[in-house]
Structure formats: C-alpha cells, structure tokens
Image (tube, rainbow, N blue to C red):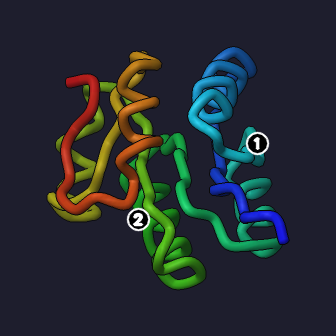
Amino acid sequence: MAERRSLALVCEDTDLGRWALTRALEAEGYEVREASTWMEASEWLLTGRFDLALVTVSSPDNAAEVVSAISRQHPHTHLVLMTDQDSIRELRLACGTMLEILVKPFDLERVAKVAVSHLGSGSETLGA
C-alpha cells in the first residue's frame, strides 16, 4: 500500500505567485491543490484532509473568516496566512499573535522552511 503524500492547499491571487508556491511545495514532496480565491479554496477544503494551507488574505475580516473555517473544518491543518508587510499588525489584532504569517513578496527558501517544518510547534512571521 502506497504512503499518502502530504497535501497542501495554495490560495494565492496571482498566477505567478501560485505557480512559484506550488513548485516550491512540490519540490518538498507535497501534492498541491491550487486556488485563486478563498471561494475556490473553500471548495477544495471540502474534498480532503490538508496538512498545510498557504492562504493569501486581503483584510483582517477575510483573515478571521479563513482562520475560523480552517480551524473548524481542518483542525490539524497547519495554516499560514500570506499578506503584505503593512497588514501584519491588523491581522494579529484580528486573529491573534500565534498566527503564522508569510510576508509578500515571499522568499521561496522561507516557503520551503514552512513546508518541511509545518508539524513543529511555535509560530513566526516569515519574511519580515
């Protein structure tokens, strides 16, 4: 019987960003599902168990919705929100300080670090 590959969800609004994140995660051994909107990502979340979810958020309200949905539907999924530097403070106020954030534009080496350590404890702001 074949071992299940780790499954990652990438929700990124730009084609290039989605492509780069997907390639970085695949290089670390993940099977990846892609979405360009939170609505598409929500549909993927109904189809299976994700080990890692990288989700771009546009506002604190959007971030709170994402955090709530993933923690409710997939409590064991390691969630990393992606946003620009200017939105970090608002995201932390809306969703808590333990939230892991990947700052855009992101460094693909940092994405790889998240991919290989997603089961570890602790949180950090990546790319800051």
**In the rendered image, which quarter contains the C terminus?**
top left
Q: Where is residue 65 in the image (x, y as percent from the top left)?
A: 50, 67
> At numbered mark 1, what does the secondary structure look like: helix, strand or loop?
strand
Q: Tell me the residue that label 2 is attached to.
A: 64
**Neighbours of disc 1 within 10 Å: few (<14), some (14-19), many (20+):** some
Quick check: 41 above or below 89? Answer: below
| Residue that numbered label 1 is attached to | 34
Residue 13 is at least partly visible in this image: no
Residue 28: x and y, percent? 57, 34
Query: Furthest-bottom residue in view?
Result: 72
Q: Bin the neighbour count of mark 2 within 10 Å (Cα to Cα): few under 14, some 14-19, many 20 and up.
A: some
Q: Please state which of the two labelled residues, at mark 1 or mark 2, is closer to the viewer.
A: 1
Between discs 1 and 2, the one toward the N terminus: 1
Q: Which residue is drawn at 40% across and 34% down?
A: 83
Name the residue: 67% across, 33% down.
26
Q: Quadrant of the N terminus?
A: bottom right
Q: Is residue 101 left or right of residue 128?
A: right
Say if 94 sits above or below 114 in the image.
below
- Name which residue type carries label 2: Ala
Relative horizontal placement of residue 91, taking residue 1 as reference (left or right): left
On screen, residue 87 above or below 124: above
Question: Mark on residue 89?
Answer: none
Q: Whole-percent x and y of residue 21?
A: 60, 28
Side of 6 relative to 96 (left or right):
right
